[in-house]
Image (spheres, rainbow, N blue to C red):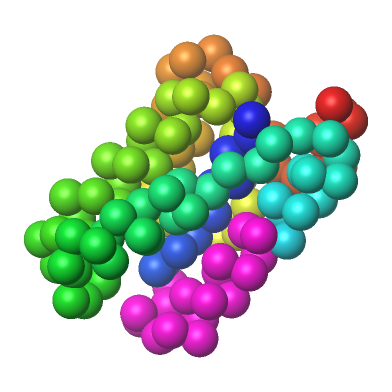
């Protein structure tokens, strides 16, 4: 399993179209990983449904904050490697740190990742 870590809210001003573009970029990277034989994972795939079910009303509210990054961090600890994409993002950099601390690979491009 390879976690795709990239900006979600960073640099978007919480503009839904810009957030959607960030998610799209991560999902395009995930598709490339899938096609190379890997199982791609995005923390957002786990966190966002939980956030909605928990009653969050706006990105960054208390419910959001109690779930979004904690879920991503738990997912990261279960993955074998990380693919860091996109621009500046404190959250994505937190994911990278988890892999570095665990001695697991961090890739910066799908071209660096060997086929499964």
Number of callouts in the render?
0
Point 40% across, 68% down: residue: 9
Task: Give residue 84's position: percent from left, percent from top.
Answer: 61, 45
Left-right relation of 59 to 104: left
Instruction: Quarter of the image for the N terminus: give it.
Output: top right
Quadrant of residue 87 in the image? bottom right
Task: Say if the magenta span includes residue 30.
Answer: no
* Closer-to-camera residue (74/8): 74
Task: Give residue 85's position: percent from left, percent from top.
Answer: 63, 52
Quadrant of residue 72 in the image? top left
Left-right relation of 113 to 20: right
Point 51% across, 81% down: residue: 18
Asked whether residue 90 appears in the rendered view, the answer is no
Left-right relation of 16 to 31: left
As drawn, 105 above or below 55: above
**Magenta-drawn stretch, dominant element (helix, strand or loop):** helix
Looking at the image, the residue that sits furthest to the left is: 62
Task: Say if the magenta span includes residue 23.
Answer: yes
Task: Give residue 66's position: percent from left, percent from top.
Answer: 17, 50
Point 73% across, 61% down: residue: 28
Point 53% across, 48% down: residue: 42
Looking at the image, the residue that sits furthest to the front is: 53
Asked whether residue 47 appears in the rendered view, the answer is yes
For the record, the magenta segment spans 11-27
Instruction: Quarter of the image for the C terminus: give it.
Output: top right
Task: Give residue 15's position: percent from left, percent from top.
Answer: 40, 85
Looking at the image, the residue that sits furthest to the top is: 103
As drawn, 97 above or below 64: above
């Amino acid at each position: 399993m390879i976690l795709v870590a990239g900006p979600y809210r960073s640099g978007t001003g919480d503009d839904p179209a810009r957030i959607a573009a960030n998610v799209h970029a991560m999902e395009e990277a995930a598709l490339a990983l899938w096609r190379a034989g890997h199982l791609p994972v995005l923390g957002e795939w786990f966190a966002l449904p939980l956030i909605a079910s928990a009653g969050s009303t706006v990105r960054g509210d208390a419910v959001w904050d109690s779930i979004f990054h904690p879920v991503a961090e738990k997912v990261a600890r279960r993955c074998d490697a990380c693919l860091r994409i996109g621009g500046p993002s404190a959250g994505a950099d937190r994911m990278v740190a988890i892999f570095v601390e665990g001695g697991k690979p961090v890739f910066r491009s799908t071209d660096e990742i060997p086929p499964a």
